[in-house]
Image (spheres, coloured by chain):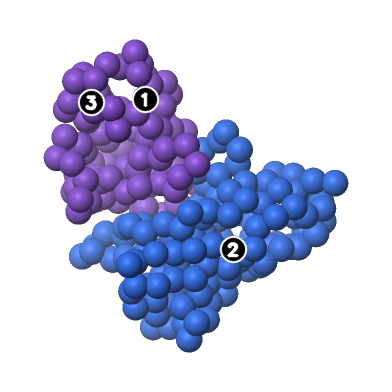
Chain colours: A blue, B purple
Amino acid sequence: EVQLVESGGGLVQPGGSLRLSCVASGFIFSDHYMDWFRQAPGKGLEWVGRSRDKANSYTTEYAASVKGRFTISRDDSKNSVHLQMNSLNSEDTAVYFCARSEYRSAWIVFDIWGQGTLVTVSS
Amino acid sequence: DIQLTQSPSFLSASVGDRVTITCRASQAISSYFAWYQQKPGKAPKLLIYAASTLQSGVPSRFSGSGSGTEFTLTISSLQPEDFATYYCQQLNSYPLTFGGGTKVEIK
């Protein structure tokens, strides 16, 4: 079965750090870009960032709201991608989703999503 | 950043109704555009990509159209399992952005 499973969420104090993980199964992980998204309680979806594949030197992209605080890394040998979150504030409270990015001809699609992991930033 | 304005934000409809949701982009994005369905407590589910291509396994009552700055998601005959929130997304440029969502509720 093709799936993504996130972990690592929880309660963290403002200014703290947290590392989320997303483990893939059922497909060739190393062939895909991987993205992170988030959704604040009762709000819409927000793209967080992207990790490209080895062929593209594992380069990354980030939303302005997290750039300089969040870092995406991946370990193809363990079929996993990680989101290191530092200097957290209340606006980072959200469910975080990882998603598989697939190219179909010229089109990028996010066809596989994890179930999400909740991050709560509060004192 | 490319802004996506989705309308309506809320829609009340009955089973069997034809439903249309619109998304307008702040600049032209060709067909780098997708629609998702999300149910409470669940991850988004891809419905349409490349503006009009139906994702495998998605019922044919869902269809997408548009290009450039105006896009439409149509559900030809609303089913009970279609009551959910729908989001549009542009994939033309970073940062990838979403519309504000349309919640479809039972009338």
Number of residues whose C-alpha sits closer than 10 Å to that of mark 1, classed few (under 14), some (14–19) or many (20 or more) = many
User: Residue A59, can we see it?
Assistant: no
Residue shown at the point (49%, 63%) measured from the top left = A5
- The quadrant of the picture occupied by the C terminus of chain B is top left
Q: Is mark 2 on a helix, strand or loop?
A: strand
Category of crowding for the residue at label 2, using alpha-carbon neighbours closer than 10 angstroms: few (below 14), some (14–19), many (at least 20) = some
Q: Which residue is drawn at 30% across and 17% down?
A: B13
Chain letter behind tag 2: A
Work out whether residue A63 or residue A110 is closer to the camera in this orientation and state it: A110
- In the picture as drawn, the residue positioned furthest to the bottom comes out as A77
Q: Give the Cα separation between the discs numbered 1 and 2.
A: 30 Å
Residue nearest the observer in this picture, B14 or A17: B14
Residue annotated with mark 2: A7
Q: According to the image, label 1 marks what residue? A: B104
Image spot of residue A71 (x, y percent): 63, 68
The amino acid pointed to by label 2 is Ser
Q: Label 3 belongs to which residue?
A: B78
Q: In this view, does A29 lie to the left or right of A50?
A: left
Residue type at mark 3?
Leu
Q: Residues within 10 Å of mark 3 (few under 14, many from 20)?
A: many
Dot placed on the residue nearer the N-terminal end, 3 or 1: 3
Percent position of residue B104, x then y: 37, 25
Asked if residue A52 lies left or right of residue B64, the reply is right
**Of A84 and A69, which appears nearest the observer?**
A84
Q: Can residue B61 be seen in this view?
A: yes
A15 left or right of A85 in image: right
* Residue B46 image position (x, y, % from top left): 32, 49
Kindly check if marks 3 and 1 are in contact, taking CB atoms under 8 A apart as contact. Answer: yes
Residue B88 location, quadrant = top left
Please, what is the three-letter code of the amino acid marked with disc 1?
Val
Q: From what the image shows, is residue B24 above or below residue A6?
A: above
